[in-house]
């Protein structure tokens, strides 16, 4: 495979060709975390909405992220209703759709193009379950086949149902050598965290704050305790996202977890660059490089991973899946009873 080497000069990016081959599937993600640990760094995971600001520019932006130091890239799948995202990311979804990235097939073509031009870091496709699976008429196997063939390494799905739906999706992903990344929300119970940890194959994404995506000025208080609570349930890598916007915040996260995800901030930087001489690729390269400078870990870094991949428990032991589904249903019934009890006095 040809690799594009990027050199910044006079507000442009110059590219030359060499040769490299990306590692496929789950192994590539595991290798990324392992390599970062050997360098004494956390893993940096920048996000861009696929097709932003248009399909051609997006390829250059992905390559610039890699050159800037991205260990893994999170590539958003455009959606007309990205309900978990704040204004910045929501706006990038609209721009991407308006400029032609209207389907998974277009997005995967962008990824294929980037791979052919030298993108070798793992890519996580992040999107909304109903929108993405709906495009494939619920044929998850076909979606996974297409994603793997195009060079994706994982999915991170928002809005997927607990229990049978997420277990089925997770199993199919694993069948096609794709990792299904689990989101740990701030309000997750210990039982839920344990279930998410058992379903993980590479890493878990710890959401740092409640609410929607968007750049913030500081890390939330108690974040180390939040990450430590998840660490009690797994030895896999833990990455932290939502709100990270500068190298100091990356460094703070790097020393209490295994990686940092940065999204809205980078899109804000490109939006602020409109009308300037520097290209989006140069801006992305510069900003990712700055963020990467904060990824060094001190000797006292906490909550560090001991392993970099695993076979999901319900895949390794098929009988576990039935018990997990039964437990989800029981938990749902209990929650329904609690809601009825809480609402009871209102209707008396």
Image (spheres, rainbow, N blue to C red):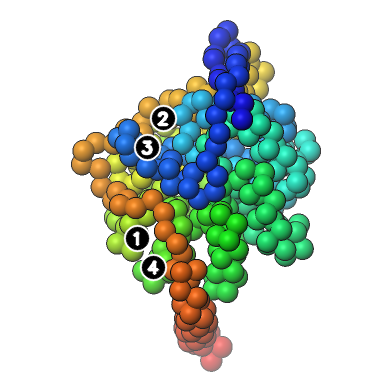
Q: CA distance from mark 3 to mark 1?
A: 19 Å
Residue drawn 55% across the image and 37% down it: 22
- Left or right of 196: which side holds 78? right
- Left or right of 347: which side holds 208? left
- For label 1, the SS is loop
Q: Is residue 182 above or below residue 33?
A: below
Question: Who comes first in sequence, dot 3 or dot 2?
Answer: 3
- For label 4, the SS is helix
Q: Which residue is mark 1?
A: 234
Question: Residue 292's mark?
Answer: 2
Q: Which residue is mark 4?
A: 194
Which of pointers 3 and 2 indicates the residue nearer the eye? 3
Whether residue 93 is visible to the viewer of this picture, yes or no, is no
Depth check: give the residue in front, 130 or 34.
34
Q: Residue furthest bottom?
A: 348
Question: Who comes first in sequence, dot 4 or dot 1?
Answer: 4
């Amino acid at each position: 495979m040809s690799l594009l080497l990027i050199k910044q000069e006079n507000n442009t990016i110059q590219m030359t060709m060499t040769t490299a081959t990306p590692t496929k599937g789950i192994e590539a993600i595991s290798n990324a975390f392992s390599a970062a640990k050997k360098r004494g760094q956390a893993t940096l995971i920048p996000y861009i909405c696929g097709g932003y600001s248009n399909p051609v520019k997006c390829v250059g932006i992905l390559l610039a992220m890699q050159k800037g130091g991205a260990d893994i890239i999170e590539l958003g799948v455009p959606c007309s209703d990205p309900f978990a995202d704040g204004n910045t990311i929501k706006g990038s979804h609209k721009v991407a759709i308006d400029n032609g990235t209207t389907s998974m097939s277009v997005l995967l073509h962008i990824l294929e193009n980037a791979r052919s031009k030298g993108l070798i870091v793992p890519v996580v496709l992040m999107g909304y379950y109903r929108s993405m699976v709906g495009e494939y008429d619920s044929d998850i196997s076909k979606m996974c086949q297409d994603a793997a063939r195009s060079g994706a390494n994982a999915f991170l799905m928002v809005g997927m149902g607990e229990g049978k739906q997420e277990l089925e999706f997770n199993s199919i992903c694993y069948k096609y050598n794709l990792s299904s990344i689990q989101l740990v929300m701030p309000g997750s119970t210990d039982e839920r965290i344990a279930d998410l940890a058992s379903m993980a194959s590479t890493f878990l994404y710890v959401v740092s704050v409640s609410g929607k995506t968007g750049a913030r000025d500081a890390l939330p208080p108690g974040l180390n305790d939040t990450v430590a609570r998840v660490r009690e349930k797994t030895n896999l890598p833990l990455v932290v996202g939502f709100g990270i916007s500068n190298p100091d915040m990356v460094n703070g996260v790097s020393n209490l977890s295994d990686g940092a995800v940065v999204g809205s901030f980078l899109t804000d930087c490109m939006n602020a660059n409109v009308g300037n001489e520097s290209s989006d690729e140069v801006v992305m390269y510069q900003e990712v490089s700055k963020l990467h400078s904060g990824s060094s870990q001190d000797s006292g870094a906490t909550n560090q991973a001991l392993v970099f991949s695993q076979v999901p428990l319900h895949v390794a032991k098929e009988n576990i899946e039935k018990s997990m589904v039964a437990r989800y249903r029981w938990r749902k019934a209990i929650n329904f009873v609690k809601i009825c009890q809480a609402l009871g006095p209102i209707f008396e």
